[in-house]
Image: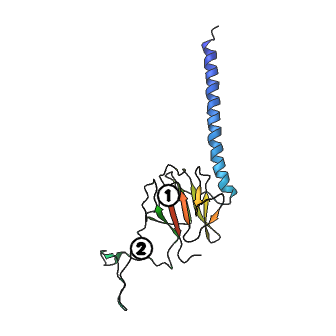
Amino acid sequence: MDMPLGLILLIGKFAFLAALYAFLTWAFRGLFRQMGLEASAGVAPVPPQPAPRPVPAPVAHPVASAGAPPATARSGAADGSPLVSAISHEHARPRLVVQEPGQSRLLAGQVIELTAALTIGRADDNGLVIDDRFCSSHHALIFTHGGERILRDRDSTNGTYHNGRRITGDVVLRDGDRINIGTVALDYRAPGIE
């Protein structure tokens, strides 16, 4: 029993359209689920930000005698101003300090200054890109709300850990808190902010 070629092509077209419909449904359901989670939490989706540039860590300076100007790490700018100087902890911005880079390309001691919101994940559109195989594409979010800095897991596969415990909701960050994402350990620093 031979089927005419036209009937075979018609069945093939319908099978292709069904597969395409299933794929598009799956893709849009994931997209809307992610958008719906951010909208239901009362937080606007964060636009992609360029990766933050590492800020040099403060340099320890020798104690100067009374009345002497403070020492600088090194001079060398055209006007004789220091290229690196100590950070005043009273006015320092909140930041993350890499304690254990794990399997990522981050460096131990690397400092990431925090803006109003910082997305963290493996994808290039995050503010902090962690190229660790245990880090999800859009893993976590740190944002401000009511004057506090909040850590949120973005439904990552392996979870976000705050002081050794996997988080399930929003967590308020305090100076000295440890954040683990994949194999990377970050310390939250907010001197003078409580």
Task: Characterize the local packing of mark 1: few (<14), some (14-19) or many (20 or more) Cα atoms within 10 angstroms.
Answer: many
Residue 123: x and y, percent?
A: 51, 51
Q: Is residue 71 left or right of residue 167?
A: left
x 64%, y 16%: residue = 7
The residue under label 2 is 58
Amino acid on which the number 2 mark rests in the picture = Pro
Instruction: Please give left or right for residue 85 compared with residue 98 in the image.
Output: left
Q: Which residue is farthest front?
A: 164
Query: Which residue position holds label 1?
Result: 184
Q: Position of residue 106 (x, y in %)?
A: 44, 58
The dot on residue 31 is: none
The residue under the point 64% across, 21% down is 11
Neighbours of disc 2 within 10 Å: few (<14), some (14-19), many (20+): few
Q: Residue furthest top?
A: 1
Figure quadrant of residue 57:
bottom left
Which residue, as the protein is rendered here, is positioned at the far bottom? 67
**Residue 46 in view, yes or no:** no
